[in-house]
Amino acid sequence: MSDKAHPATAGDILVIGGGIAGCATALFLAKAGFRPQVFEAYPDIRGIGGGLQIAPNGLAVLDALGLAETLSARGCLCERAEFRDGRGRLLGTMANRPAAGGRLPVMMARASLQEVLHDQALAAGIPVVHGKRLAGYEETGDAVIARFEDGTTARGDLLVGADGLHSRVRRVLLPDGPEPTYTGLTGTGGWVPAATLARAGLPGAGAMTLFFGAGAFIGCAQAEQNGAAAGTWWSSLARDAPLDAAARVALTGKAGLDTTLAAGGGWNPMVRQILGTTTEMIPPIDIFDIASLPRWWRGRAVLVGDAAHAVAPHSGQGASMALEDAATLARLLRERGLADLAATLAAFESERRGRVERVVAYSRRIGATKKRGPIGAYVQSLVLRLVLRLSPPDFGWLYDHRVRW
Ligand SMILES: Cc1cc2nc3c(=O)[nH]c(=O)nc-3n(C[C@H](O)[C@H](O)[C@H](O)COP(=O)(O)OP(=O)(O)OC[C@H]3O[C@@H](n4cnc5c(N)ncnc54)[C@H](O)[C@@H]3O)c2cc1C
């Protein structure tokens, strides 16, 4: 990727959602000479969420923003993954081959990625307005007007829907479009002192450990270099339906910890020891995805990130796909300007759709391995043992991909 100098390009761009996709898109748009403004529903975005992975393809995009080193230094390189069954027996290990450019995936707190992107946007002079929840938008021919729930409006040449899985922009753009699909898994998670991982007999920084129990999965890794609770665990629990109010309570806080420990056919001492030191539970999250939308843009509005193609977290690609979208959309707008938006937004969709839909489908397939019953989980552990020994997966198609900027 090259960071070319380009002439200032007129154009006010309203970015709805100040998450990963929103902040990254605004940063690239500003570099491309546009005037982005970010509108985020929540009053504060700091300190939220569990750990996530940024894959080498996502790190390459962060490189173009000058942020890959900062973030890699905050998080932990993931050199290998260890696979275990629910009883804790080792099924095999898999080394992560460095991708093109020599990078490895990095585990980090979602909050770190979010904060660094957000603060960089502010440092670049991009207005990031909090407490602005989009209610809807209208087009007037030569502009798009965003309406917020507080009664205010904003006017722009283009509106970018970076408002996540349950995107309001998507519902306006595609009123009859598909709703996100519940994948039959709900996640819980928490933060633990990093030393707990080694004490429980797991590798510390540099590796993640994945436990496949019956109808439940738990992953553990060190995700941050610093902090009293730099280790994290995350679970996927098989369920028939998304959480209702009562089920949400049962998966929240101490009750959520107990429910997670009771899942998986009874976890091994390593898992019990790690979860037992949880200092902070992350609110439960139903895992949805969006396999395919009929279109990603209409008129003066376009979708990016989870709003366009929510990826279940199992492939560790949600944030990286959002970053790839951000650089691609801004590059196309830089190259073509705002004159023929229809052609530019169609080019964006066409450049991204095949790749992200493949990643969504891949992630869904991995998710299916996390909800097998006792017999299925046993058979799967035998298969995993063989696969890891004879033919470990090659992530080249994911990690070596580079979007042009
Ligand atoms: C609170 C939170 C915690 C998360 N925790 C994890 C995690 O622990 N692990 C993991 O792998 N992934 C997590 N994710 C998902 C992950 O961030 C995304 O899958 C990925 O980074 C793609 O990012 P995105 O910007 O497209 O979507 P998101 O990260 O979901 O960002 C969307 C943003 O839009 C805002 N928004 C929503 N509706 C509106 C509206 N109407 N008007 C204005 N703003 C709006 C949201 O508040 C949010 O800030 C989390 C997402 C959120 C929002």
Image: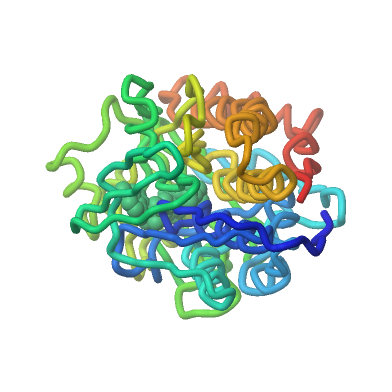
Say which of 370 and 48 sits in front.
48
Name the image colouring: rainbow
Q: Is residue 26 above or below residue 388?
A: below
Q: Nearer the viewer, residue 274 or 401?
A: 401
Tally the numbered discs. Answer: 0
User: Which quadrant holds the N terminus?
Assistant: bottom right
> Looking at the picture, how far across and down is residue 306, in whole percent?
48, 41
Residue 66 appears left or right of 10: right
Residue 67 in percent (x, y) is at 68, 69
Q: Quadrant of residue 272?
A: bottom left
x, y percent for residue 224: 57, 70
Residue in the image at 29% along x and 55% along y: 153
Q: Is residue 49 visible?
A: yes
Name the residue rendered at 73%, 27% in the picture: 386
Question: Does residue 135 appear left or right of residue 274 in this picture?
Answer: left
Q: Report whether 182 appears left or right of 210.
A: left
The residue located at (50%, 64%) in the rendering is: 114
Does the rendering let one see residue 284? Answer: no
Q: Is residue 245 above or below residue 120?
A: above
Nearer the observer, 388 or 318: 318
